[in-house]
Image (cartoon, rainbow, N blue to C red):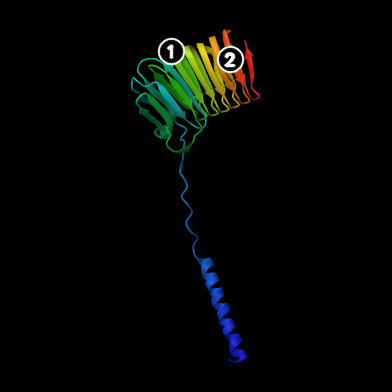
Amino acid sequence: MTKTNYITGLGRHALLLLACIVAGYGRPAAAAEPQARMTIGSGVAAEKTIALTAIARKLTLELPGRVSVRVERKAAPRVLIRFDRNLLELISVQSDGATVKIGMSASFRSNLELRLDIVLNAMESIENNGSADVAIAQLSEPRLLIDSPGSGNVSAAGRVERLIVRLSGSGDLSAGDLAASACEVSASGSGNASLRCSESVSGELSGAGSLSVAGNPKRRSVRSLGASEIEYE
């Protein structure tokens, strides 16, 4: 092969390579992964009522955003939902025997606050996993468990014999209006708690929150392993 033919051959290979590169850049990019659709609230307020079984007594909340929940102990168990009209169907209420679980079935954005009025015949436990602010009224139970691993606040009023509290999130517990005979506390988050115990208070604090105990309990055995402070009123 002459020198001229050799150079010409190299030029053809270079042109072929350039054509392949240009063809590659000209191809459409791979389709992006589909993103979850977010439903935008209409801003038109509406309400919906869902009946609950008479044996419902355990409540689990997994609600994000601005949510106000009021729980009462009355007859005719139900959940009254107040929200944007077009977002009502996104509220998931699942009832499995004694347990009622309330959450969201899809992403949403709303300018209205989600409000839930929950009525139960009896209340044995509440688990607040999200950011909902929960107010529990008119309690009269032998035992109540309040489990709050989220950022929502919980308040409670009424009377219980035995109160069990588990705080592992940043939400506060205001139970100074809940008269309890015996209180058991386990706190590992940054939330603060106020209780009223007449007979005994026990437990362990390992977070950064504080504990305030009213009612002058006769037996006191709460250990603080972290930066938590305990105050007896």
How far is disc 1 from disc 2 in space, using C-alphas? 22 Å
User: Tag 1's secondary structure?
Assistant: strand
Amino acid at pointer 1: Pro
In the picture, the disc for residue 221 is: 2
At 39% from the left edge and 29% from the top edge, which residue is drawn? 93
Q: Is residue 61 above or below residue 7?
A: above
155 displayed left or right of 53: right
Mark 1: few/some/many CA within 10 Å (<14, 14-19, 20+) = some
Dividing the image into 4 quarters, which one contains the N terminus?
bottom right
Q: Is residue 42 above or below residue 10?
A: above
In the picture, the disc for residue 129 is: none
User: Residue 193 appears in which quarter of the rendering?
Assistant: top right
Please state the horizontal and vertical placement of residue 230, each as a whole percent of the image.
63, 17
Mark closer to the chain start, 1 or 2: 1
Please state the horizontal and vertical placement of residue 145, each as a whole percent of the image.
47, 20
In the picture, the disc for residue 142 is: 1
Q: Is residue 74 visible?
A: yes
Dividing the image into 4 quarters, which one contains the C terminus?
top right
Amino acid at pointer 2: Ser
User: Tag 2's secondary structure?
Assistant: strand
